[in-house]
Amino acid sequence: MKLLSDDVPSYRSGVGLLAIHSAISLNDAITVGLTGKRKIYQDHTHAARELGRVCSSAGVPDRKGVGHFKWLLGQKNAVAYEHREFDDKSVRLAVEKAERFNVWAYDQFKEILRGV
Amino acid sequence: MVYKLTLSPEQQYGRAKNVIADLLSRQLIVPKVFFEAHWPGRRDRVDVLAVDRSGSGELHAVEVRRGRDLKAADVIERLMQVPAHFKYLALFDNPKNLRPHSRILYSPDGIGRIGIIEVREDTLGNLNARISVLPERFKLDSSVYKMVDRFTANYAAVREVRP
């Protein structure tokens, strides 16, 4: 994602989708690490709600990451199901949101994600 | 007439550290980067230290040296003592392209090799860093993560992504 994002016009969709899927994978790692179960959702927005629940049960008050994740999932819906295309601005924002989600996740779930 | 911009040694060293921080930021996942890091102890100093995954991942330690007055054996010996998963010697101002002999880059037990970063300026004055010798991962006890947590809690990173 980071390497391709040097050339957003050429790799627009690829960068956007990598940003979204990296966040989905990291969210899976958190939920599997904490609950031992990997859930599969038809509607990805449920994954954000589940992450909120995981935060509650793990006693994580900082929910900034849930917001970033929700935004990224919204983009996935728009691209995959509503056939809207990424523009350069939304791709750059997706990369930024994915990076911020990463930082939040590694800060809040350090012990779970160490070694992932 | 062509003017050649001459920077002080401190400026050249600072630029080299900065371009190395760029390189590590691109290679790693949301790292925290520290300059002149007091790692592993308060009296120690590592020129550039990057901790991957926002401080929860592997450690990358870089010693930055001017190539023209390189004392390779000293700096390699020093780097061998630094607890880090990946270690690098970065060389700038290196017109003769000096570099340590490859055999001294390896850990005595063979688990780990110090990488080499070359920092070069192009004709337009742009500075670039590239890894010319890939580092190999050193073996570290997992207790290092407790030290890392204390370090990242006590020192502010010069470069990090905000959540």
Image (tube, coloured by chain):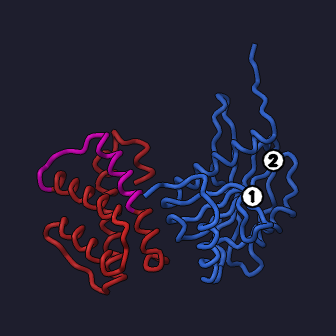
Chain colours: A red, B blue
Report if residue A85 lies within the magenta region. yes
Question: Which x, y percent locates residue B62?
Answer: 70, 59
Q: Amino acid at mark 1?
A: Glu
Vertical position of residue B135 compared to residue A74: above or below: below
Badge 1: residue crowd in 10 Å (few <14, some 14–19, many ≥20): many
Q: Relative to the observer, which residue lies in front, B42 or B49?
A: B42
Please state if A76 lies on the left or on the right of B93 as rendered.
left
- Quadrant of the rendered structure where residue A32 is? bottom left
Magenta stretch, overall SS: helix
Badge 2: residue crowd in 10 Å (few <14, some 14–19, many ≥20): some
Question: Which x, y percent locates residue B126?
Answer: 63, 34
Which image quarter is the N terminus of chain B in? top right
Residue at the farthest top position: B1
Label 2 belongs to which residue? B66
Q: Which residues are magenta?
A: A81-101
Which image quarter is the C terminus of chain B in? bottom left
Tags 1 and 2 on a common chain: yes
> Where residue A90 is drawn, which disc sits there?
none
Chain assignment, label 2: B
Q: At x 25% / y 60%, what residue is drawn?
A: A70
Q: At x 62% / y 83%, what residue is drawn?
A: B143
Please state if B55 lies on the left or on the right of A92 as rendered.
right
Query: Does dot 1 land on a helix, a strand or a loop?
Result: strand
Query: Does dot 2 land on a helix, a strand or a loop?
Result: strand
Report if residue A77 lies within the magenta region. no
Q: Relative to the observer, which residue lies in front, A13 or A98?
A: A98
Question: Which x, y percent locates residue B109?
Answer: 74, 81
Q: Amino acid at mark 2?
A: Arg
Chain assignment, label 1: B
Question: Which x, y percent locates residue B122?
Answer: 66, 34
Please state if A101 lies on the left or on the right of B150 as rendered.
left
Label 1 belongs to which residue? B63
